[in-house]
Amino acid sequence: MNYERIGQLIRQLRTEKGLTQEALAEMLHVSNKTVSKWECGNGCPEISLFPALSAALEVDFSALFTGNLDEKQKNSGNFRHLKFYICPNCGNIITAVVPTGVTCCGKMLQPLIAQKAEGETLQVEWIDNEYYISSQHEMSRDHYITCVGLLSSDQLLLRKLYPEWDVQVRLPRAIGAQLIWHCSQHGLFYQPLPKPIRQPRNR
């Protein structure tokens, strides 16, 4: 662990966000002298502080730990990198632009890894300038689609679904978006959207 490199990265990210050492210290419940010590390379945050520090500086946990911010991590604010956390007990949906510590119902949640929908995909039609999304997927209490949404680089449009509902969702067009959906048994999926059909002009 390179204390000097980690300290330089903390200072860089803190100043980019317009935070003083004191403000960052208050967010982490440490003293400003502690933050100063980190930035001078004379010490390093305790491991338990890294999740809160990465959230405060809006950077990937691994970037802080190594002190190395590559181009992909610099773009972590892009919604394409959005992390989804879904509680298996209550169905609560939580999102974050960077990995962070998330708990629900007393359990630590892990970010879901989206898989490309292959065998089963949702049906998507372009109707009245909106996407009409439907599916014959089982919707029982033990096996159902929990949510359907559109994800682009700058926005997330999400609809929550419940057991015994029909999967029939209308969503407005989002430029450059892809369809995302979550199955209570099989996880998070994504699939490309068909291109909207141009409406004929009235003459």
Image: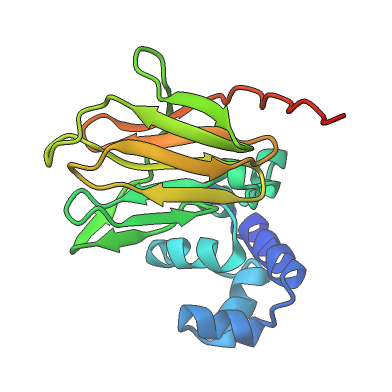
Q: How many marks?
A: 0
Q: Residue at x 39, y 56 (%)?
A: 94
Foreground pick, 87 / 131: 131
Query: Where residue 8 appears, x then y in whole percent?
Result: 70, 62
Q: Residue at x 24, y 42 (%)?
A: 165
Up-down: is 29 above or below 40? Answer: below
Quadrant in which residue 193 is drawn? top right
Up-down: is 49 above or below 190? Answer: below
Q: Residue at x 41, y 20 (%)?
A: 117
User: Is residue 44 something one can see in this rendering?
Assistant: no
Query: Where residue 98 appears, x then y in whole percent?
Result: 53, 52
Q: Which quarter shows the C terminus?
A: top right
Quadrant in which residue 163 is drawn? top left
Foreground pick, 185 / 67: 185
Outermost residue to the top: 119
Up-down: is 133 above or below 8? Answer: above
Query: Where residue 112 appears, x then y in whole percent?
Result: 37, 40
Query: Where residue 170 appears, x then y in whole percent?
Result: 48, 42
Foreground pick, 138 / 62: 138
